[in-house]
Amino acid sequence: MTPAIPGALRPDLAVIADHVEPGARVLDIGCGDGELLAALTAKGCDARGLELDAANVAACVGRGLSVMQGDADTDLAYYPDKSVDYAILSQTLQTTRRPDLVIENLLRIAPRGFVSFPNFAHWRVRTSLLLGGRMPVTKLIPVAWYETPNIHHLTIADFRDLLAARGIRAERAWFFTNGRASHQVMANLTAEHAVFLVSRD
Amino acid sequence: MATKASDTTSGPVIELAEPLLLDSGRTLAGVRVAYETYGSLNADKSNAIVICHALTGDQHVASPHPITGKPGWWIRMVGPGKPIDTDRFFVICANVIGSCMGSSGPASEAEDGRPYGMRFPVITIRDMVRAQVALIDALGIAKLHAVVGGSMGGMQALSWAANFGDRLNAALVIASTARHSAQNIAFHEVGRQAIMADPAWHGGDYYSKDVADPRKTGPESGLAVARMAAHITYLSEQGLTEKFGRRLQDRDAKTFGFDADFQVESYLRHQGLSFTDRFDANSYLYITRAMDYFDLAEEHGGKLADAFAGTKARFCLVSFDTDWLYPTGESRTIAHALNAAGLPVSFVELSAPFGHDSFLLDVPELDRVVAGFLQ
């Protein structure tokens, strides 16, 4: 998951950064060491973060970013309604205890949200489970089942189902394989990673 | 000697032109504020940082203490090339009113020429900040780059933001709280009772210079006990265990008496006694009272988020996982209130073994956070 070129944004983060207009207020939930926040700040956004890991928070504050240490499952409740233009969940949804409630909070805090996650239905994951009979360990899911932070694996189809059940609209979706944009067709089979722009009608 | 401390003024002191109107409703005239500065103020006066000191701290952040000769209390944080870089910033630290290092306090002379003693008005954290605002007014500084403080210093930084929100761009609050808890008040009350139960306290009237007068030495035993009790709250159990365990002091066996058999006893006695050389017992009463009265939400209608309605400052809150005096939940509560107020806020709980005192000690991640936040 490290960027191919030093200083270049991860492709999923680059898509998000490209589609947030300068000056927008943004909350990045699970902001890591602040890579996306820094890019958004550089383009004139009022970008703030929420991050669980203290060392990551210290790194963010150390580079001048506004980041709160906190847990997406419990601390989003303290953010006021419609307080930002975009809320971003980058590679965080599958680590939360209640992804559905986190998505609800996301669209309470912001009218629009970006959600990115690894696709558990990618063919490599499917074959690994089918043929190996063991929980897959792949490039995007690199940690064994007993120590992975990913406690709610999902597929692109699962995510679409959740959106439909909750009356949430997928405005756009981007898919990635091998760090490059990939096809929309059969994405649930061919994409390693998805980014959705969601909103509530 | 307590009185020695109160006479000490080694640096600049200003006398406020206007009397201070206090939260108690009383006014205090002829207020003196002793302070130190480090670095230089730039041409547009935009690089000033006020550092607020803790309960028994003073203005000597990065310069030797005039009584003990010890280095400044935050030299690891403040100085050329340090996280609070005096090559870039003009750092101001004022002794709080009520204290005994040159600013007006109970040991100061009242209008009748005699020390105030208990006639000194009860002051609050906000009153301390009012005196600091008057100081930066006198220095011609309209807006501070930041206000920084740990422990009681953090309370002052919060009070600056809540009451003088247009005078600062940022507030950095370390190991602090928006209000004193019942447990905090309880520990302070133990300390105050130790002082007031000492017969040498004499109702606070112990500043006589007459060698024949029994009222010439203060309640040093009481003050030492107060310091011992408080000192325990500044450390973690883990820290005490690592430093002392059950080790004995200069002996091979227990004495079956009440000497300081254990190293931890000897250490606390030393902490208590050395404290009386540099601090005035009445100041200890007044400042602990100010801390106990501190409740930022109460001052602003009961809702903490409302306290920050008048500021656009950036905030950073830091807590330590071993601090049981002002535990992480206190900082998190403040961070949530700031979030609710829509203000830019960073908050992090750092891991450090030293308890509440971690903010004064070697925690490299704190240095990184402080430097990054102030950049």
Image: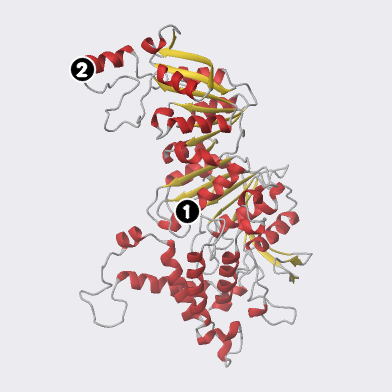
Taking depth in this image into account, of B277 and A103 the one nearest to the observer is A103
Please state the chain letter of the residue tagged with numbered disc 2 in the rendered image. Answer: A
Q: Secondary structure at mark 2?
A: helix
Residue drawn at the location 50% of the way across and 36% of the way down: A50
In this rendering, does residue B219 appear at all? yes
In the rendered image, the residue lying farthest to the bottom is B212
User: In front: mark 2 or mark 1?
Assistant: 2
The quadrant in which residue A64 appears is top right
Q: Residue lying furthest front in this view? A: A165
Q: Amino acid at mark 2?
A: Gly
Q: In this rendering, would A129 be left or right of A149?
A: left
Along the line of sight, the residue nearer the viewer: B174 or A26: A26
What amino acid is at disc 1? Phe
Q: Which mark is residue B359?
A: 1
Q: Position of residue B82 (x, y in %)?
A: 51, 46
Figure check: A58 above or below A40: below
User: Image point 35% across, 31% down: which residue?
Assistant: A151
Q: Is residue B365 left or right of residue A148?
A: right
Tell me the residue at 26%/73% (across/down): B250
Relative height, residue B333 to residue B299 (above, below): above
Crowd tier of the residue under label 1, counting other residues whose Cα lies within 10 Å: few below 14, some 14–19, many 20 or above: many
Tell me the number on the disc at residue A132.
2
Q: State the separation of the CA atoms marked 2 and 1.
A: 52 Å
Residue A45: give x, y in percent of width and height: 61, 27
Residue toward you, B224 or A39:
A39
A135 sits to left or right of B293:
left
Horizontal and vertical percent for residue B264?
33, 69
Task: Characterize the local packing of mark 2: few (<14), some (14-19) or many (20 or more) Cα atoms within 10 angstroms.
Answer: few
| Horizontal side of residue B21 vs B210, given as left or right | right
| Residue B6 placement: quadrant | bottom right
Q: Position of residue B169 (x, y in %)?
A: 66, 44
